[in-house]
Image (spheres, rainbow, N blue to C red):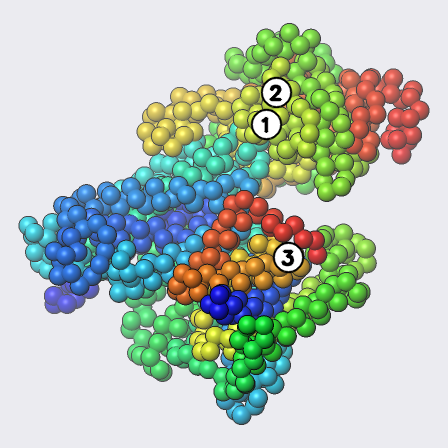
Amino acid sequence: MSSAQLFYVINLLIYAGVDIIACLGLSQQFGVAGVTNFGFIIFQAAGAYTAAILSLPNQSANGAFQSYIGGWNLPWPIPWIGAMIVGGLLALPFTFLVGRRLRGDFAAVGLLVTAVMANLLVTNYRPLLNGAAGLSLVPAPLQSKYNPLSAGYQWLYAAVTLVLAAAVFLLVRRVTESPYGRSLRAMRDNDIVADSLGKNLLSLRAAILVLGGALAALSGAILVGFINTWAPSAWGYAETIVLFAAVIIGGAGNHWGAVLGAILVPVGFEEATRYIPTFGPPGLVDDLQWVAIGLLIVVFLWFRPQGVLPERRRRIGAGAPPEPVEIPNEDVVTLAGSLRAPGLADAMGQDGSAVRVTGRPITRSVPSSVEADGGVVLRTVDVTRDFGGVHAVAGVSIEVRRGTLTGLIGPNGAGKSTLLAMLAGTMPVTSGQVIYAGADVTSVPAYRRARLGLVRTFQLASEFKRLTVMENLLSAVPVNRGDSLAGALRGRRYWRPDEEAAIARARALLDRFGLSGYADTYAGDLSGGQRRLTEIMRALMTEPTMLLLDEPMAGVHPRLARQIGAQLLGLCAEGMTILMVEHELAIMDEFCDPVIVMAEGTVLATGTMAALRARTEVVEAYLVG
Amino acid sequence: MSLFLASFGFGLVTAAVLAIAAVGFTMQFAVTDVLNLAYGAVMIASAFVAYALNQAGVNVWVGMLAAAAAGAVGSVLLNTGIYTPFQRRGSAPITMVIVSLGMTLIIEFGLQAIVGGTNVSYTMSQGPTVKAGGLILTTVQLVIIGLAVVVMAAVHGLLRYTKLGKAMRATAANRSLARNCGIRTDRVVTLTWALTGVLCGIAGTVFAMNNGSFGATSADLFLVVILAAVFLGGPGQAYGAMVGAVIIGLATEISAAYITPSYKDVIAFLVLLIVMAVRPGGVLGATA
């Protein structure tokens, strides 16, 4: 090969490494955590600028033809490390955009706009980073000792880049394949439900923004060390879209997909067009290239939204026979074990073993304050919720005693689901107090209430669709050493014991609910009844003190509904407290005591079903309906 | 003081252009729940339709009518051809935003491939300068302000007093409920995109006039300003967008006079981020 060809190959390798690092960072945010960072390119730019001003000499010592801050003349690898630190820190102010309150698409637009503005500011304000002209003569790493133009240096540069890309690959894989990565994917699939299971969305998103930001910055630092120049034109907002195209086409959430996308789109696509003979007026080929990027995104999202290499299914199964599992259309699933007939005695288990799952009680111990409160686990004082002028819930005061399966009924619009949401913290109260286990939790956020043992399920199916049933269950485990970024980074060996214990508990629950054969099935592929069961099992995995169930039997085959009811009674006998919204009066008759009747936002009556049926106002409001 | 009045006048013109654009954007969001980031691209493409006619010797105000028609056709095609099929499939809002970004690239750079990368201007007379109450404006600027007032009044009339307007508000509030009440929501949505497309085409033309010269990617920054007005008024709120447009229009131009013109859009950007962080439902709390 001639030296020009050699240089071209080296060039390609370095660009590939840089793009792979960037795409892995973006895929971690977008594909794994569901954080759509349209401002990703800002972080690459920040890394490049940081590395540049750390390695450049002072501006006056550098011919004084460009103006920039810094100029510390620091030796490699300090500029690269500094770039990563700055890229990570820069992510922190962005977390307020991707926090809990803002819709994901709004946040994405906010980030996009930020990218446009950041570019505008750097372009117009010359003293900071030399404005539109950008920085040039950025020193190559260790150029005082070696000749950056020598073939050996360049090969080494390419090798270092690729080694770093490989290291980044291992790093993001370690994070994604850990319990922490599972929490990220749960958040991606349904953030409100993840919140209700005790996941701190803000800290998860902040961590993933910082990690992705640091990786983007590293890619920028490597690039600027090689091309020795960096200007606003290199990081227009549209460059982010190129990286998104790469991740979408390669396969969001699959690390090999990110690698493939990086090679196909920014490297392959832009290189391939070099060989198109120039035609038309100047700039035409560039324009068509952008059109093609836009087309690739739209066409792929339509025909193959999962990308060339889709996210792979994690099989942690229950040692079950190999798939395929046939998924019946109807919801007739027979519960396993000794629970074939409803009723408390059976639910207790013939040998008493059903009350414990692998030696651990499903319910955590009840705080002593509950006993002091006459066995009341949860009480509300004049809880109210207004929507505009409508009092969805108006001054509700209820008590739920320990070990009861309390029913909550009422006609549509009575405020049952709203009340449940306020109890769980998914929705703030307009006024009033929620007291759980003797403590006022009115202003405690949902994820922290869940950690205190107060866990809800949802009226609409709320499984994490692209997690398997087993993963859905594991995602709810409150204590796992691998469920933090630090724990995940320490590797599998560190968290394996916790994980294995959790898997054992999940298997026992799957056995108990008769879903062992579905452990490795995507929850999104289950039938309606199976999803409800999965959701209840997942809530149980949090080791709750109290469960808030929103119509757990809606759309479930009556026979299965009664089996679920028997299971719930069994749990109450073990000491769990359950408040259940349900429409089916037969279920209430059979399982719930006491029953709270709501109508038009207020509590109409409380008592046993038999007593309630004797009261005319209750019958009029609801029972005959 | 005269500096303030001069910038106030410019602010009114910008607010006028912005109001026409922002009301169209926010009504698209209201009925389809899509943040159509390709809005700016359609604006500029429409402005180039007027430019093509203008080059052929047609008066630019007549060209604006053609631009309005082009905006309507383009918007309806975009919605029925791209956005609706994706939504029927149950695509998440975030997917829709990514699709709209892809469409932005396709439209903008497709346009640039045709018209080239250099900026152009309409051939038109600015008319005599008018002085009123310390404000100094050209006739064209006055016409733009008047046009905006007429358009806002028309939107108000449509939403308040016509059956279609009522159907649009019902569809925006709850699409499936509206359908169950006998409203042909698909038709309402298509009509909404046609009407907002008209606004988009007019906005593109007056934006191009007000800018003096324009190119295929000129609306990129203006989209930020549109978004700021829309979010300030609450996404989906037509009246909110009008008020947001006036505030953002005046704020950007007046700050440009006192700080420096290069940074005038930064005010819009800061407003947008603060609104998103503090009151993502909009600050003005208007109900459309």
> Which mark, residue A443?
1
Three-letter amino acid code of the residue under disc 3: Gly
**In front: label 1 or label 3:** 3
Establish if A406 lies above or below B241: above
- In the image, what residue occupies the spot 79% across and 21% down? A595
Q: Can residue B201 be seen by looking at this rendering?
A: no
- In the image, what residue occupies the spot 73% across and 28% down? A581
Q: Quadrant of residue B243?
A: bottom right
Secondary structure under the numbered disc 1 in the rendered image? loop
Secondary structure under the numbered disc 2 in the rendered image? strand
- In the image, what residue occupies the spot 19% across and 64% down? A8
Whether pointer 1 and pointer 3 mark residues with C-beta atoms closer than 8 Å, the reply is: no
Q: Residue furthest left?
A: A145
- Disc 1 residue crowd, few under 14, some 14–19, many 20+, Cα 10 Å: few
Q: Can residue A588 be seen by looking at this rendering?
A: yes
Establish if A268 lies above or below A107: below
> Which mark, residue B240?
3
